[in-house]
Image (tube, helix red, strand yellow):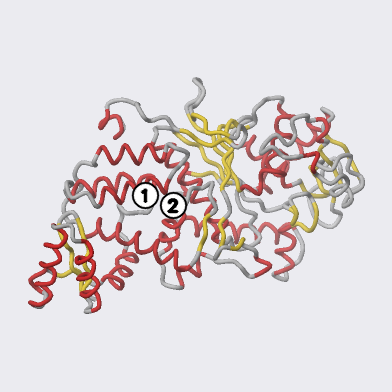
Amino acid sequence: MGLWQRLFGSKDGRTLYLYNTRTKSKEVFALPSWARTVRMYNCGPTVYGVQHIGNLSMFVFTDILRRVLEYNGFEVKQVINFTDVGHLVSDADEGEDKMTAGLKREGLELNLENMRALGERYASKFLEDIRTLNVDTAKILFPRASDHIPAEIAMIQSLEEKGYAYRTKHGVYFDTSRFPSYGELGGVNLSGLKAGARVAANPEKRNPTDFNLWKLDKKMGWDSPWGKGFPGWHIECSAMIRSTLGEQIDIHTGGIEHIPVHHNNEIAQSESATGKRPFSRFWLHRAHLQIEGAKIAKSEGNTVFLSEIVERGFHPLALRYLFLTAHYRSTTNFSWKALEGAQTSFLKLRRFVDLEEAAPGTPPSSYLRKMHEAWNDDLDTPGALSVLWEMLKDKKLSSADIKAGILDADRVFGLGLGAPDSTAAAIYTKLFGKPIALEKTPGDVQARIKERDEARNMKNWELADKIRDELETKGYILEDTAGGTRISKR
């Protein structure tokens, strides 16, 4: 029996709502009666370079999604793919292959062996980064597109046999006119596309929205019935999903930029190949992360990497906390000032747990219920954080019970608060100083702290804040906890 049932005795209020891009509405998430496990696919990185924090934010989001599903009692089979071939610079099948561009950038010979090595190097760096952000990679499958070439070829052959694909001198294309519901995901305005705009790059296309299934390349690639070349980016995801999760899945995620092209293409080719609808019951998309109010763009040098954050003395989980402060469907703005604020909040939580010597008590059920309701309202992490801080400020609760509540909430927040963290301890000691007893402070400081306590009891917040600021200039940091005022000396 889970904690929720132990505390509340039923599943009342446990309904999980997720916003489904396919229906443009929040829907109750539940498994079909015959199913036992949530089958979830998360569009993963193209591993031709280090992923910036905008890319990493996607996988904190999918980690939160997994944790909320598990908190609600679901078992989850999660897949994050590595695209190590076939992703062109433009999602509309134009430009250079990103992996080829990566080889050229690093001065490596263009061959499949080097391409695979490049992909593995940056896949390892990606795994290191998301583990640093407390994503449990042991629970996730990470297929490589280059390991599924036979499955990708077989799927293209099936589409060709069923009349959904046609050959050109450039390769094989999917005929979107054969799939009447193309563009339904996200309500893509197909009539609004400039006729010929996407045909101009390849006049052999029958329709502007037709997309590449196999790209011919005489210099490098794999042998196929159509000639040497590469699979298209879109077919890779469909084939990997089919190989790892089956012909239909429960949840598919990605960035909002994937909606118009990549995800509509996946739907078209997958449902055409299998004859089964829907390909995915739920589609969830994360909004963009901006840096200082501007879209992340490598071409303009507007990127930040996790390594830079650590080099500047920040705890990496401060970045995770920052991601939690905005809803996944709202644009998140990264700034160094915002990260400082997130780190302060994260360290206060960390410090409370670390310095509370008593064993965890009983999690406060009323606050757990509110947090659970927030998580179940389409992953409202900002709302749940607000409830968490209300709980910390509740003077009616014991420190032991607050500690228990924090640790239970961290099952979803994933800030690693239940495990020792020497890095966090070193940072918060530097920022807040070392805790000292009241009687170890000078007499005038003791008097002012007692005066402040009296002001707080009288709800004279202005005087209390004034005294706190005054003492901080003298190197004394005051923290208000359920057990009283905690004093630290810088």
Say which element carries label 2: helix
Compare residues 348 and 229 and report the one nearer the observer.
Answer: 348
Q: Which three-letter amino acid code belongs to the residue tagged 1? A: Leu
The picture places residue 94, in percent across and down from the top left corner, at: 80, 53
Q: Is residue 62 visible?
A: yes
Q: Residues within 10 Å of mark 2 (few under 14, many from 20)?
A: many
Separation of marks 2 and 1 at Cα, in angstroms: 8 Å
Residue lying farthest to the top in this orientation: 33
Residue at 55 percent across and 53 percent down: it is 331
50 on left or right of 105: left
Percent across and percent down for residue 203 are 92, 47
Amino acid type at circle 2 is Leu
The residue pinned by badge 1 equals: 385
In the figure, 72 relative to 302: above or below?
above
Tell me the number on the disc at residue 324: 2
User: Where is residue 116 shown, x and y percent of the image?
Assistant: 67, 57
Residue at (31, 37) in percent of width and height = 369
Name the foreground residue: 50 vs 361: 361
Q: Are marks 2 and 1 in contact (CB under 8 Å)?
A: yes
